[in-house]
Amino acid sequence: MSDNKNWETIVNAAVNNGRSGCSCSEAVAYTFAKHIGGDCNLFLKMASGFAGGMGLMGETCGVIGAGMLIIGMQCGPCDIEDSQGRRRSLMLCSEFSERFAQANGSTLCQSLCHGADLRSPEGARALRESGRPEHLIRSGAEILVALLAHEEWMKNA
């Protein structure tokens, strides 16, 4: 199926962006922005603070934050009165978080990264070398693709 090949390309691009030095959140946001016609560098900037569990606090994984950013951009309300778009976006964000937690055991960065000290260069380097970020990026990207597969942008990706 040709769609699967396109989806694999998107997922692999996200993983490669993570390998190239992007944080998990940046890798997901930058990659998906390209496929929704967004400004990749703007999405990169918007997602940068999500890294390390929201500003290195070990809280919600940046992959989830970036995924929600993409979902909102694609499915969110078109204006402040669009309650249907808002509801749709919230439901997809909830589903994304639930699937991510089910696949990875948690939504908390500190838990997902096995307590690595992301504030120290040594801790961040050790985490990267473990391959854990690549796994989380891949997992989040696969879930995001699956959730949005029925959307028009994925058919044209």
Image (cartoon, rainbow, N blue to C red):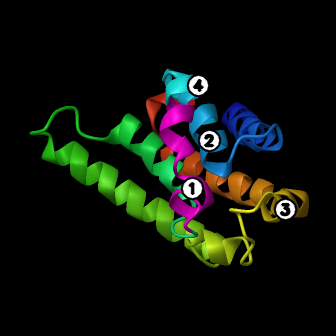
- Of badges 4 and 1, nearer the viewer stands 1
Sooner in the amino-acid sequence: mark 3 or mark 4 = 4
Q: Residue at position x 68%, y 47% from top? A: 23
Under circle 4, the secondary element is: helix
Disc on res. 122: 3
Asked if residue 7 lies left or right of residue 78, the reply is: right
Q: Residue at position x 71%, y 78% from top? A: 115
- Of badges 3 and 2, nearer the viewer stands 3
Q: Quadrant of residue 145?
A: top right
Sooner in the amino-acid sequence: mark 3 or mark 2 = 2
Sooner in the amino-acid sequence: mark 3 or mark 1 = 1
Sooner in the amino-acid sequence: mark 2 or mark 1 = 2
Residue 54 covered by magenta stretch: yes
Alpha-carbon distance for marks 3 and 4? 32 Å
Q: Position of residue 92 (x, y in %)?
A: 39, 55
Sooner in the amino-acid sequence: mark 4 or mark 1 = 4
Label 2 crowd (10 A; few <14 / some 14-19 / many >=20):
many
Residue 132 covered by magenta stretch: no
Q: Amino acid at mark 3?
A: Glu
Alpha-carbon distance for marks 3 and 1? 20 Å
Q: Is residue 90 above or below residue 28?
A: below
Residue that numbered label 2 is attached to = 26
Q: Amino acid at mark 1?
A: Gly
Q: Marks 2 and 1: CB-CB under 8 Å? A: yes
Q: In the rendered structure, which segment of residues is drawn in magenta?
A: 43-57
